Amino acid sequence: MCASGGVGLSFSKPANCKAHWLRLKSDFRMAKKVLLVYAHQSSGSFNAAAKDAAVEVLAAQGCTVEVSDLYAMKFKATATAEDIIGEVKNCDHFRYAEETKLAWEAGKLSADITEEQRKLTEADLVIFQFPMYWFTVPAIMKGWIDRVLTLGFAFSQEKRYSQGIFKEKKAILSFTTGSQESMFSANGINGDMNVTLWPLQNGILHYCGFQVLAPQIFWAPSHAPAEVRSTMLEGWRTRLQGLLGEEPLSFTPLDCFDGEKGFLLKPEVCEKHATKEFGLAVGIHLGKPLPPNNQMKAGV
C-alpha cells in the first residue's frame, strides 16, 4: 500500500510509488527553507496549534522554518511613505508602488520590509497561517502583503502570473473559518469558497508567480468538539509530510493572453475551449459554469 500523505496524490503501482517518494526526497533535499507568515493574537488558538504543527513536522524533515509572527512583531499594516528611508521622488502625489520600487532598487526600504523580503527570497515554500476575517486575510497579514510584495521585488509588468518572479517557489493558504463547510458551498449562504479564494490565490500568489498549493482549510474549529479539532490537526500533520511534493493548482498561462489587446484570451484559446462544459477557471469562466473545485484541488 502506498499513500502520498498529500492531497490528491496516490499511486497504485509500486514502481510509481517508489518514483514518487524519490521525488519527495529530492524536493525536501533541495527545498529546505520555509517561511511561515502567521497572524493570530493568541498562542492558545487553533491557528497557533496549526502553525506549531507545521514547524515541528517540517523541521523533522530537515527543513529550516522561519516564522513571521506578525502580531508578536507588531508588524505595521499600513503602506505609507514611512516605508521609505529618506526623501521620496514626488511628495505632492505620492504613489506607493512607484516610490517603493525606487526605494527597493536603492536599498532604501524600511528595515522591517527588508527583513521580510530577505526571508521570502530565501524561502522555497511560504505558508500563510491565519483565521479568515471577512472572507479574506486579517488586516495585519494584508499589510504584510501590501508592504513586502513591492513592485520590482515581487512583480513587474513583464514578470507576473506564470512568468512571475517567484515561479520557482510554492505557497499555500492554511486558515480557519468561522462558518461550517456547507455555508461556503455553491448553494450555501456564504457562497462558493472557490470564488472567495480566487482573489487571494490568483490575484496575489499566482500574480507574483508562486506555484499555489491547494489550500488547507480548517472548517469552523471553534464550533467543533476537541476530538474533531485533533483530527483536523492530525490531517494537517499528515499532509505536511508530503507537502513539497504536491502538484500545484492550475492557472491559465500568461502566453494565452494577448498583451496588445488588453490581455484578453487569444482567439485560438477561446476556440479550443468553446466546446468544453466549464470555463477555464473561477475568474476566467468564459460565461460558462465554474469548474468545480478549481481553487480547492489540484488537477481540476
Image (cartoon, helix red, strand yellow):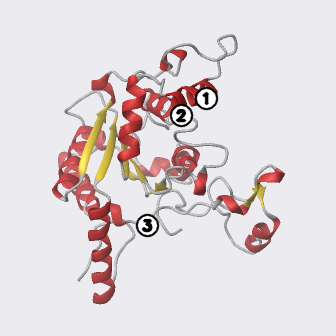
Q: Secondary structure at mark 1?
A: helix
Of labels 3 and 1, the one closer to you: 1
Tags 1 and 2 touching, CB below 8 Å? yes
Quadrant of res 131: top left
Sequence-earlier tag: 3 or 1 = 1
Frontmost residue, 238 versus 77:
77
- In the picture, measured across the screen, residue 21 lies left or right of residue 163, that is left
Instruction: Give the residue at x 52% y 56%.
Output: 295
- The residue carrying mark 3 is 247
Task: Say which amino acid is labelled 1.
Answer: Ala
Q: Would you place residue 227 above or below residue 5 in this image?
A: above
Task: Report the disc number at residue 215.
Answer: none
Q: Would you place residue 90 above or below residue 101 in this image?
A: above
Circle 3 residues within 10 Å: few <14, some 14–19, many ≥20: some
- In the picture, measured across the screen, residue 91 lies left or right of residue 7, that is right
- The residue carrying mark 2 is 150
- Residue at mark 3 to residue at mark 2: CA–CA distance: 27 Å
Find residue 214 and report its horizontal and vertical position in percent. 43, 58
- The residue carrying mark 1 is 97
Find residue 21 and report its horizontal and vertical position in percent. 27, 75
For this orientation, the residue located farthest to the top is 92
Circle 1 residues within 10 Å: few <14, some 14–19, many ≥20: some
Instruction: Give the residue at x 29% y 61%.
Output: 239
Quadrant of res 99: top right
Q: Can residue 295 be seen here?
A: yes
- In the picture, measured across the screen, residue 259 lies left or right of residue 147, that is right
Q: Quadrant of the C terminus?
A: bottom right
Tags 3 and 2 touching, CB below 8 Å? no
Circle 2 residues within 10 Å: few <14, some 14–19, many ≥20: many
